[in-house]
């Protein structure tokens, strides 16, 4: 099948892109479009470009990422479409994204079906629209609307696209029919090249640039895209195209583009596990949830938003009623954000969700997720009860963040049905789901965990059993590194600022306040008996907890939160607590530069991540990257900690570890896998490639 089909419908040449599954703008599509336009100029009075199947052009062909481009490049294709001597119409359905929308912008007229989506998401890959998108879009929409679309990558609906000027019409019908109708009208009007339209009026581009830098938290692509749109306002069209290509080339050479592309592919590879090939998941129609606190209610809401039936069980009728109210509040919030349609809410209220105070209510559930207090005895008691009441073949899942799932499974007579499903709070919003596989977990139970994640639109990562699995195990280690820095003299507020400057979504001490300091306190108590005697144990976090300072929920933690403020302010009392502890331990505080804070933070993270991979808890380095990107606020444009280490140089990371180890040889001892890779001149990416199915 040709990637581009050409046929005549009267005096209109119909150019159909047929490159399943998403009609990506591959080399064959690009070459076919140029050939079709040239032919149409000879044989027809108008040309119509449509997509076959379920979409128009959904973007570039990811199979060509990282490879040398082949002529014709997409900019050449778009310029050729725009220069066509007969009117060209693009009829859009499904999605017109990235290069797909740029092709449509190069056409002379545009029409779409009502449910079409249009967008330029290139900044999410560390680049900008490089085939005229930054020059043509603002000529249609004005600079403000174009800047909003391009710098955020946010897609717009057909209705919004019509309102802001991208589309000429929105019509019901097939793309071919509505496109033919417009093409026949366009014959009388003639070509209308977008590049011939007046340049957009100037806006405060410097303010937009500053806004994009702030919103991007270190990512440069959105701010660079502002300068490309600025060129559309200030330069002739052909000069603007040249400026766009120059800026596009700068971004292509940026390590940020490499990091974002890695993140893109890693998220697609993370669920591909060779041992699960050909294994079918178990049926999922009704989900049970045990525990109606914040996490349990969030899990219930996530499942309801995904169209599943949910039964939530709590300890008594009053607790069940409170849990039901929490879920209702989350659903109300989702409805306000447009994430829950009225008809689905009606289904939920008329029987799709119920809360109960007895485990017997779970007798028909296909999968039950326990979300009770993080205590082994409590969880084993819950699972012993589930073993008695749940039907044969039901999956029994625990939402534990740290505990041994093998021990939990041992409380049942069916350990092969037991798995860990570690959600992240708020569970109905956060994207990450760690699928934790115990020793006896059956393969179809693992597949069912991944199937649930897909149903919930979450990113699932396979993890093995250890204290903290992938993410929390790494978190505990890098948190120890920064706590030791603070004990040695670093200011916790400087630490937060330095790591936010690195690109982290929040500083670690602000994160502790948000999550609640009592969570870490409980973990430290649990691990105290097995702590290695060589471990340094700063006491300031426990001191804060003993004072009842648990973070935002109590108005005080590491920061002060006056009058219920969501953003904290530094607290001099914390500084005094730190000074007192340093004096008690006979420590002379020293200063740390932001660079040293960042280097120690990343060395600790990468070193423990290398142990996690070396121990088999994470199968591949990319599993670590996806975990930290999706659940821990690691800057996406850096690709994840393992990708960051590869780009920084594993030899340099190892050198940092050995330098830091002079002061604390136990904590900073290099992971065997990291040492091995450096000795062999290999990278974490080499391990990813070796693990490909």
Image (spheres, rainbow, N blue to C red):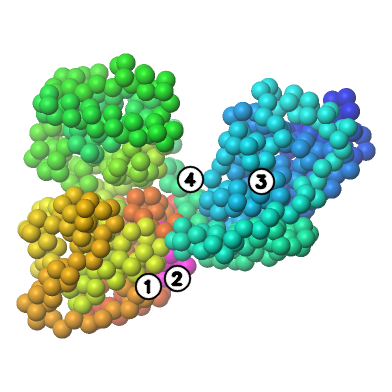
Circle 4 SS class: helix
User: Gap between marks 2 and 4, in whole Å?
Assistant: 24 Å
Look at the magenta stretch and give its main secondary structure: helix
Residue under label 3: 141
Q: Are marks 1 and 2 in contact (CB under 8 Å)?
A: yes
Q: Residues within 10 Å of mark 4 (few under 14, many from 20)?
A: few
Sequence-wise, which precedes: disc 4 or disc 1?
Answer: 4
Sequence-wise, which precedes: disc 2 or disc 4?
Answer: 4
> Which quarter of the image is occupied by the N terminus?
top right
Q: Residues within 10 Å of mark 2 (few under 14, many from 20)?
A: few
Left or right of 591, for residue 198: right
Which residue appears at 33% of the width and 31% of the height?
331
* 599 vs 103, nearest the viewer: 103
Which residue appears at 24% of the width and 32% of the height?
326
Which residue appears at 67% of the width and 41% of the height?
166
Question: Bounds of the magenta span?
Answer: 638-650
């Amino acid at each position: 099948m040709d990637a581009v089909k050409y046929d005549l419908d009267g005096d209109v040449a119909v150019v159909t892109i047929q490159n399943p599954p998403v009609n990506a703008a591959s080399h064959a599509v690009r070459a076919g479009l140029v050939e079709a336009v040239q032919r149409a100029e000879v044989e027809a009075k108008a040309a119509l470009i449509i997509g076959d199947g379920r979409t128009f052009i959904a973007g570039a062909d990811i199979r060509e990422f990282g490879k040398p481009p082949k002529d014709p490049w997409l900019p050449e294709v778009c310029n050729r479409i725009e220069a066509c001597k007969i009117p060209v119409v693009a009829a859009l359905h499904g999605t017109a994204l990235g290069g797909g929308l740029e092709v449509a912008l190069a056409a002379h007229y545009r029409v779409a079906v009502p449910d079409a989506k249009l967008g330029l998401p290139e900044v999410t890959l560390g680049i900008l629209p490089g085939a005229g998108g930054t020059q043509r879009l603002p000529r249609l929409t004005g600079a403000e609307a174009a800047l909003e679309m391009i710098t955020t990558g946010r897609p717009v609906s057909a209705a919004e696209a019509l309102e802001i000027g991208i589309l000429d019409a929105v019509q019901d019908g097939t793309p071919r029919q509505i496109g033919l109708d417009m093409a026949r009208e366009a014959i009388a009007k003639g070509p209308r090249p977008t590049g011939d339209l007046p340049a957009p009026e100037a806006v405060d581009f410097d303010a937009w640039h500053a806004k994009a830098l702030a919103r991007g938290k270190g990512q440069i692509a959105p701010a660079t895209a502002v300068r490309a749109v600025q060129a559309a306002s200030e330069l002739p069209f052909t000069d603007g195209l040249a400026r766009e290509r120059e800026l596009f080339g700068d971004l292509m050479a940026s390590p940020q583009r490499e990091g974002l592309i890695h993140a893109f592919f890693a998220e697609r590879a993370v669920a591909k596990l060779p041992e699960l090939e050909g294994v079918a998941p178990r049926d999922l129609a009704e989900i049970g949830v045990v525990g109606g606190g914040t996490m349990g209610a969030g899990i219930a809401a996530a499942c309801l938003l995904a169209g599943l039936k949910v039964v939530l069980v709590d300890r008594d009728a009053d607790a069940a009623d409170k849990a039901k109210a929490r879920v209702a509040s989350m659903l109300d919030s989702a409805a306000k954000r447009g994430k829950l349609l009225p008809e689905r809410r009606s289904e939920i209220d008329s029987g799709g969700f119920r809360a109960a105070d007895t485990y017997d209510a779970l007798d028909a559930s296909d999968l039950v997720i326990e979300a009770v207090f993080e205590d082994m005895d409590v969880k084993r008691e819950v699972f012993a009860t589930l073993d008695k009441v749940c039907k044969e073949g039901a999956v029994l899942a625990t939402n534990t963040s740290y505990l041994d799932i093998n021990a939990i499974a041992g409380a049942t007579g069916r350990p092969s049905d037991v798995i860990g499903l570690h959600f992240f709070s708020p569970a109905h919003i956060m994207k990450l789901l760690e699928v934790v596989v115990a020793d006896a977990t059956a393969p179809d139970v693992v597949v069912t965990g991944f199937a649930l994640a897909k149903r919930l639109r979450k990113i699932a990562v396979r993890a093995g059993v250890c204290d903290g699995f992938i993410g929390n195990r790494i978190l505990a280690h890098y948190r120890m590194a920064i706590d030791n820095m603070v004990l040695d003299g670093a200011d916790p507020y400087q630490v937060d600022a330095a790591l936010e400057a690195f690109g982290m979504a929040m500083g670690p001490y602000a994160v502790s306040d948000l999550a609640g300091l009592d969570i870490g306190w409980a973990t430290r108590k649990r691990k105290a008996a097995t702590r290695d005697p060589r471990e340094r144990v700063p006491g300031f976090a426990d001191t804060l907890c003993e004072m009842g300072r648990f973070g935002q929920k109590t108005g005080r933690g590491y920061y002060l939160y006056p009058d219920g403020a969501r953003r904290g302010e530094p607290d001099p009392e914390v500084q005094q607590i730190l000074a007192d502890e340093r004096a008690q331990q006979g420590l002379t505080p020293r200063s740390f530069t932001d660079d040293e804070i960042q280097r120690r933070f990343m060395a600790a993270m990468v070193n423990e991540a290398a142990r996690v991979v070396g121990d088999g808890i994470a199968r591949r380095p990319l599993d670590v990257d996806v975990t930290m990107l999706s659940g821990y606020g690691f800057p996406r444009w850096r690709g994840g900690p393992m990708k960051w280490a590869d780009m920084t140089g594993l030899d340099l990371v190892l050198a940092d570890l050995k330098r830091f180890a002079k002061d604390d040889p136990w904590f900073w001892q290099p992971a065997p896998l990291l040492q091995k890779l450096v000795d062999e001149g290999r990278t974490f990416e080499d391990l990813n490639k070796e693990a490909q199915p």
